[in-house]
Amino acid sequence: MNFSWKSSPPSNKNYTLLETFECNTHQFDAILYSYKDNCYFYLIYRGSIYFDINVNYRITINERRIEGVHQFSKFSNDFGFMMEKSPLFNIEFFMSVINQYNSKEETSFCGLRNLGATCYINSLIQSLFHIKRFRNDIYRCNPNGKILFLQRLFFNMQNQEYVDPTEFVVNLVDDVTLHQDIHEFSKVLFDVIEKESKKGGFIDNKDIKKEIVEDLIQGHVVNFINADCGCTREIKESFQDIQVEIRDFCNNKLASNLIDSLKLFTAVETLNGENKYKCDTHGLVNAKKGVLFSDLPPVLFVLLKRFSIDFETGESSKINDFFKYPEILDLKDFCVNNFSTTYKLYSVIVHKGGHDEGHFYSYIFLNNQWYKFNDNVVTKVPKEEAMDMNFGGKHSLFRKKKDFSAYYLIYIKDLYILDEEITINSLVLDEINKQNIKKEIRCITFNNIKNYRGPGFYNLDSYNYPLTGYQEYRIKGSDTVKILKNKIGGRERLYLFKVANDKLIYLSDDQLLDGKDFFIYKKNDYIDFKKQKLVFIKIFKDDIWFKDTIPENLYLSFIAIVNNNIHKKIEDNVRISDFVLYKEDFLYKKVHKFNINDDIEHGDIFIVVKNTHTTSLECFYKDFSSRMCVNVLIDSQNCISLFLPSNLESKFLLKKIRSFFCNEEISLCPFDPVVLEYLPLEKNMVSIDIKDNKLIYLGYGEVTDYNNINCIHPFIAPKNITGKDFYKIFLSSDYTMEMDIKNLRVVDAVKDTLYLRDYSLDEPFTSEGMNLFQSFNSNFIKVAYFIGNYEIKGYPFFLFVNNHTVQDFRNEYKIFSRLVKYDFNGYVDLDDTDILNECSKETFILIERN
């Protein structure tokens, strides 16, 4: 959109609305504002901003041209510039909204992802990356440790549109959500670079004495004392940045610009009166004390001390006073000798916000143009935005203190260090490319293996036993444990173990993820796994093992963190008073009693068994470890596992399958290509032809709530079979239990729905879900559980009542939650005095579950 305006300056403290306009559904005001002798042009966004809006603008005011890209956000809804004095302003204005902004395409530079509160890292890294001398120095280091992470980050910034710095960041800071100071972080980073470069060395032997930080950013000052007696004293100190004061400890304003602040920094102090200098030769004498720069680095960091502490109240605050800094800085008046002292402003790092939190972003001068690096967004901006707008002080339009101002300045003395040709040694490049290769790893948590009924504590690959779940993560070859923890996230502490040969190897944060399978333990507490061991506890119950089924007798119950107190840990978690502890060694297919003197290692598996059931456990495990799953494919929706002897001859397999499903018509068949499309062939799988029959899942057990049935067995029977004929099949099977046939009916219930049907024994019945035989000997109601907005959970079921009120019902079944009547027309909350047997047969009583 193009606009032309002519206007004289408004009177002092007033504004002129040039125009209100709409651009891509966004509304803006263009105004002129006068304050004292200055006039300003402002563009203000009207309305609420819920996401960042990038606009491309170009404004010409009396032949002065300003152009760039501005990012409107919920933190910044205006921008403007001071105009040169004139009785009349001729303004040409162009603006367009950029719907899909691509930093790389618009500026040739890439942004960096903010990992939570890592803007301070992004701002410093961008400023260092574009100093090509610094980048080359990093590339000259041997690719090891944290240096390799920085090399890879720089390489990705050169070649990608958008860079995720997670690998580098999480290996340098502990908490990516914690706000930190950029100046403090710079000290950490420079210290790491110095130590790692010295430790790993440089690729070229001629760089063996090189000091990256010292050579590039470190200078020296001389603290001197000139005594009237003629004696002098000088102490030379190094510095990596100049820290300049804006206010003193009493909150008095000291300086409003960098030059005045440097004068205070180097001001000569007179030592006289009670504050005389004590000369080693002449005693107390008058003297002059001061500090001067003895040599200056190629890259000069200047910290504007904008954070202060009130020593009376102990409260911290940010100083957003006006403080001007020059584009060209000459330090010759503050130096000992005559040497190169002129610097060009290269980067302005801005802090927006208060003392406790805020946001950092940087402006960098590259190729005769200023750019704003705001995390993942890089925009071209005019010099006025990089400099004038960040001096601090009051907002020229709203007349209140700005909450953003320059905090860290970077000056460059020798500009050629910005333009060096980037060279990457083949050794570094090979290591970067090698470590960028990605692979998948599998991570197991306790939720994946709880109640696992196979040998060991997990099973990801073998079809001989029940498979356990896992979470898959895609990582790079150079990723460390800390990087994976950051990907997983969460508020709990994460402890990582490598899984190898059914044992666990504890990994510290800086170790590489060498391996395929890992176990993740989550706990809020700190645990020293060098002293304590993580073990798995299984429970054995001497219950019925239904023929050829995966047994429920042995299951993984919980994890224990132990040293020498394993029996105490188990006593606290298991309700078995007189127990014996066994260790499972599945590799050798055996269990043996645990001796208190035996060593305990990470990943050991212990079995808790009642003292009177030890023989049963040993017999059980011998049989259990000699079996394997055979997965029987019935159709595209149903595959059922049988647990058969591993030495079973194939000619007896069909007989076993027929016996298991109680049907002699079953035959083995080749796999149907249509079935293969839905369920590919896997190990231990056979396909059967069930002819004109149907699959029935029969649940049995003396329970009121179908959701507590723990045994559901599959049968294959004729499609139109009656309840009576099916009951005969059931009685002839190996899975039968005695039942009173009087008033017996067949029930069909579908999980997580309100499908609940009952049939007499003389009629055919549906098999949509789980079937069961149930005696109907009194009035009944239909019941189901729900959560949230009436979402059904679990199986619906029949409950039998006789003139029950809701209160009677609650008392009998210990129900204390909300009860709702639902008749497929609406939901009605029940009162305790309502009579339940007055409900129709199609009505459900819904019980709320938390």
Image (spheres, rainbow, N blue to C red):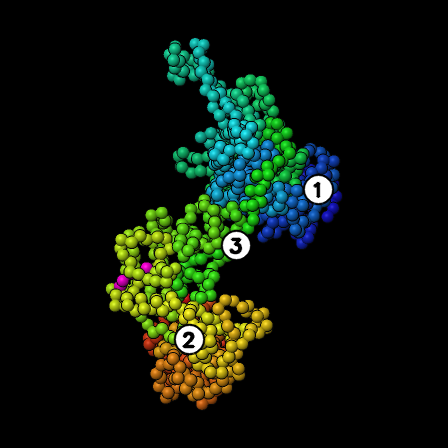
The one of 37 and 424 positioned closer to us in this rendering: 424
Mark drawn on residue 150: none
- Distance from label 1 to label 3 (Cα)? 49 Å
The percent coordinates of residue 403 (x first, y second) are 54, 40
Identify the residue under disc 3. Answer: 440
Q: Which residues are magenta?
A: 579-583
Q: Is residue 631 above or below residue 508?
A: below
Separation of marks 2 and 3 at Cα, in angstroms:
36 Å
Q: Which residue is mark 1?
A: 58
Give the answer, above or below, for where 729 lies relative to 480: below
- Residue 7 in sight in this render: no
Q: Quadrant of residue 395?
A: top right
Task: Identify the residue at horizontal 45%, vertical 76% (top origin).
Answer: 652
Q: Is residue 534 left or right of residue 358?
A: left
Give the answer, above or below, for where 129 lies relative to 105.
Answer: above
Residue carrying label 2: 712
Secondary structure beneath label 3: strand
Q: Nearer the viewer, mark 2 or mark 3?
A: 3
The kind of residue tagged 1 is Arg
Tell me where residue 452 appears, x and y as whole percent: 40, 64
Q: How far across and how far down the image is residue 384, in percent? A: 64, 36
* Magenta-span inclusion, residue 580: yes
- Camera-side residue of 689 and 814: 689
Q: Callout 1: helix, strand or loop? A: strand
